[in-house]
Image (cartoon, rainbow, N blue to C red):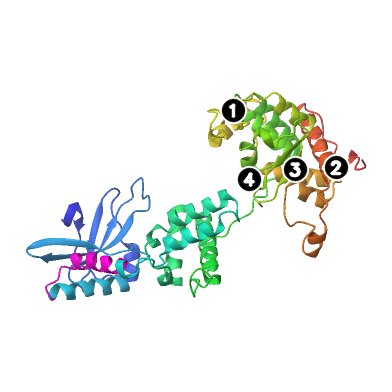
């Protein structure tokens, strides 16, 4: 048996290929000792609820003062590779031969390093510096998401000097993220880390960006689901049967083609007194630009009949303090209702409404630049130099487009056929 309940396996020559194959039983752990360096081992812990992919830590067992001790080398594998781990373990054994306790020596080194360089730029401090610099420049939610993602996915790197993280170490870390959390999460970690380092390089805080030039860990397939008007009408009918604010949220998403979080965080001061328009503030917009949304008659009716809470600016809330949550459960309930009504749909998401709406509007004769403005896209058909001079927001055209889309949705909800080619585009 190894220390602290870990099973000790027969000694073996640890190689990069062998390390990748070593496993441990679920909930247990195994110490694989290196045949070439006394006491040096790889501790492999099996899957747990908090670490479903398990954990691999380089370890050195030794005796000092008649007591068996164990010291873990940081960071864990694969951030710390075999060659570097073996080198560190060898240095510790050399100190042991000189009569020094490796664990005590490492503690002292940390104390001295902190005293000598209290402001050393670790990866954690780099993230914090980036956060402080971007506050006020980027949407708060975006900044918070970048910080959360980097701290969570690249946690083993947080205490490392930012300048000591190599491209090879970055690739190994991204491969681990892909195995544990999926390709999309790994892609986001790469993008955020590359941006964070890129900012530091431009500020002359660092010389090299280790995440630059790394291929994306996974290929993402863009969603292409476009709902027909008949499918949107079925969703409208199903949403009308749902209790609480969720049904109203889904119907407003259909009518406005806004993003889910924009509707969920909707506040009464953002809505005009006559309910004609909703102005999304720049602080809540994805592109940090205020956006005026025309409210069709159907949208106005939903808002006019939504109860208000005293001293609570939120339109959709169940506790009068925070916006509603729990959309995964509601979406499942909505799909069940669609099946009950005899109109089950192929897999779809709330975000598909935006693509579906502008696709229908294009078929109804509305020009692309109007659809771009409806979605609050920065680029689109008017970009480059033209975008610098073209400041028209096409508000009347956008209002006619959303009125036409609302009419098509309501007609489909009543079982009537869609007629996209009879839209009059003149005022």
Residue to which mark 1 is pinned: 311
First of labels 1, 3 by sequence position: 3
Marks 3 and 4: CB-CB under 8 Å?
no
Please name whichever residue, 138 or 365, is drawn nearer the observer in this view of the structure. 138
Please name whichever residue, 405 or 228, is drawn nearer the observer in this view of the structure. 405
Q: What's the distance in space between the residues labelled 1 and 2, CA to CA?
A: 34 Å
Mark 4: few, some, or many residues within 10 Å (few <14, many ≥20)? Answer: some
Q: Look at the image and tell me in which quarter the N terminus lies.
A: bottom left
Please name whichever residue, 353 or 227, is drawn nearer the observer in this view of the structure. 353
Residue to which mark 4 is pinned: 284
Q: What's the distance in space between the residues labelled 1 and 3, CA to CA?
A: 24 Å
Quadrant of the image occupied by residue 117: bottom left
Front: mark 4 or 1: 1
As helix, strand or loop, the secondary structure at mark 3 comes to: strand
In this picture, residue 244 sits left or right of residue 368:
left
Q: Is residue 113 magenta?
A: yes
Front: mark 1 or 3: 1
Residue to which mark 3 is pinned: 292
Marks 1 and 2: CB-CB under 8 Å?
no
Q: Position of residue 319 (x, y in %)?
A: 53, 28
Q: What's the distance in space between the residues labelled 3 and 4, CA to CA?
A: 12 Å
- Note whether 359 is above or below 84 in the view shown: above
Q: Which mark is residue 396?
A: 2
Mark 3: few, some, or many residues within 10 Å (few <14, many ≥20)? Answer: some
First of labels 3, 4 by sequence position: 4
In this picture, residue 109 sits left or right of residue 136:
left
As helix, strand or loop, the secondary structure at mark 2 comes to: helix
Q: What's the distance in space between the residues labelled 2 and 4, CA to CA?
A: 23 Å
The magenta span reads 98-114
């Amino acid at each position: 048996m190894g220390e602290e309940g870990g099973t000790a396996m027969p000694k073996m020559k640890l190689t990069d290929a062998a390390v990748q194959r070593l496993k441990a039983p679920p909930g247990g752990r195994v110490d694989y000792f290196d045949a070439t360096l006394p006491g040096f081992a790889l501790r492999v812990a099996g899957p747990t609820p908090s670490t479903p992919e398990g954990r691999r830590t380089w370890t050195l067992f030794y005796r000092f003062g008649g007591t068996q001790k164990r010291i873990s080398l940081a960071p864990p594998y694969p951030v710390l590779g075999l060659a570097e781990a073996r080198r560190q373990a060898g240095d510790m054994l050399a100190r042991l031969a000189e009569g020094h306790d490796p664990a005590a020596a490492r503690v002292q080194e940390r104390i001295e390093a902190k005293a000598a360089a209290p402001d050393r730029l670790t990866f954690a401090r780099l993230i914090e510096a980036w956060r402080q610099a971007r506050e006020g420049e980027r949407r708060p939610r975006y900044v918070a998401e970048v910080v959360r993602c980097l701290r969570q996915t690249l946690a083993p790197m947080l205490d490392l000097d930012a300048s000591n993280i190599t491209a090879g170490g970055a690739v190994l870390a991204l491969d681990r993220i892909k195995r544990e959390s999926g390709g999309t999460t790994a892609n986001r970690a790469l993008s955020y880390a590359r941006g964070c380092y890129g900012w530091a390089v431009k500020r002359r805080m660092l010389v090299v960006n280790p995440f630059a030039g790394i291929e994306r860990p996974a290929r993402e397939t863009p969603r292409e689901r476009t709902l027909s008007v008949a499918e949107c009408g079925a969703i409208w009918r199903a949403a009308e049967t749902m209790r609480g604010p969720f049904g109203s949220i889904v119907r407003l998403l259909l009518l406005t083609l806004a993003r889910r979080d924009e509707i969920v965080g909707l506040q009464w001061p953002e809505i005009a007194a006559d309910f004609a328009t909703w102005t999304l503030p720049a602080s809540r917009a994805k592109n940090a630009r205020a956006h005026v949304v025309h409210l069709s008659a159907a949208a106005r009716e939903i808002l006019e009949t939504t109860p208000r809470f005293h001293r609570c600016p939120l339109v959709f809330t169940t506790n009068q303090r925070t916006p509603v949550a729990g959309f995964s459960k509601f979406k499942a309930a909505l799909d069940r209702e669609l099946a009950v009504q005899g109109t089950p749909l192929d897999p779809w998401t709330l975000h598909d409404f935006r693509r579906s709406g502008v696709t229908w509007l294009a078929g109804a004769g509305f020009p692309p630049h109007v659809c771009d403005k409806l979605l609050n896209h920065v680029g689109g058909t008017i970009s480059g130099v033209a975008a610098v001079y073209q400041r028209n927001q096409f508000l009347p055209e956008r209002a006619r487009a959303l009125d036409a889309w609302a009419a098509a949705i309501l007609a489909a909800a009543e079982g009537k056929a869609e007629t996209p080619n009879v839209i009059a585009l003149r005022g």
